[in-house]
Amino acid sequence: MRSVEELLDPDGTGWNFLMRASKAATNEHRFLDTSDGKSGPALIQTGVTTASPMGAVVYETGGHGEQKAVPILELFRLQMAHREQLSRDG
């Protein structure tokens, strides 16, 4: 199991991608803030780095966002779009 430090992307790639996609979205949505200290444990539990949109949502929302604010299929679509963008960018 990787540590939080190993799972954090210092460039904030996944979250930056989500913020751009959020601004372009036509559906109503919101990301829930985390203030309960669950960000690190939630990220460790998933094992997904914050370089990906899914990892970024888990970390930035303490694990709440993918269940309550962002429909899972939409998050999956964003994850795939992010991978395609990374492939194009080299």
Image (cartoon, rainbow, N blue to C red):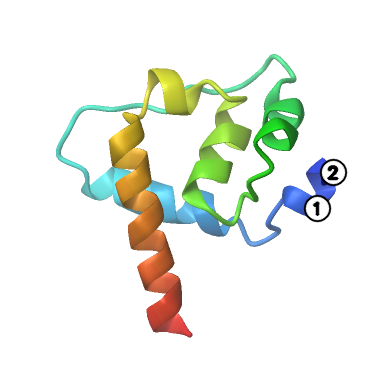
Residue 37 spot, x, y in % from top left: 74, 20
Residue 15 spot, x, y in % from top left: 51, 49
Location of residue 88 by image quarter: bottom left
Answer few, some or many: residues within 10 Å of disc 2's Cα (few below 14, many 20 plus, some between 14 and 19): few
Q: Residue at x 71, y 21 (%)?
A: 38
The residue pinned by badge 1 equals 6
Q: Residue at x 56, y 43 (%)?
A: 56
Q: Secondary structure at mark 2?
A: loop
Specify the amino acid type for callout 2.
Ser
Q: Are marks 1 and 2 in contact (CB under 8 Å)?
A: yes
Tell how many labels.
2
Q: Secondary structure at mark 1?
A: helix
Answer few, some or many: residues within 10 Å of disc 1's Cα (few below 14, many 20 plus, some between 14 and 19): few
- Residue 3: give its label: 2
Give the position of the N terminus as an image quadrant. top right
Specify the amino acid type for callout 1.
Glu
Q: Residue at x 33, y 60 (%)?
A: 81
Look at the picture and state if 66 lies above or below 86.
Answer: above
Residue 83 spot, x, y in % from top left: 42, 65
- Residue 47: give its label: none
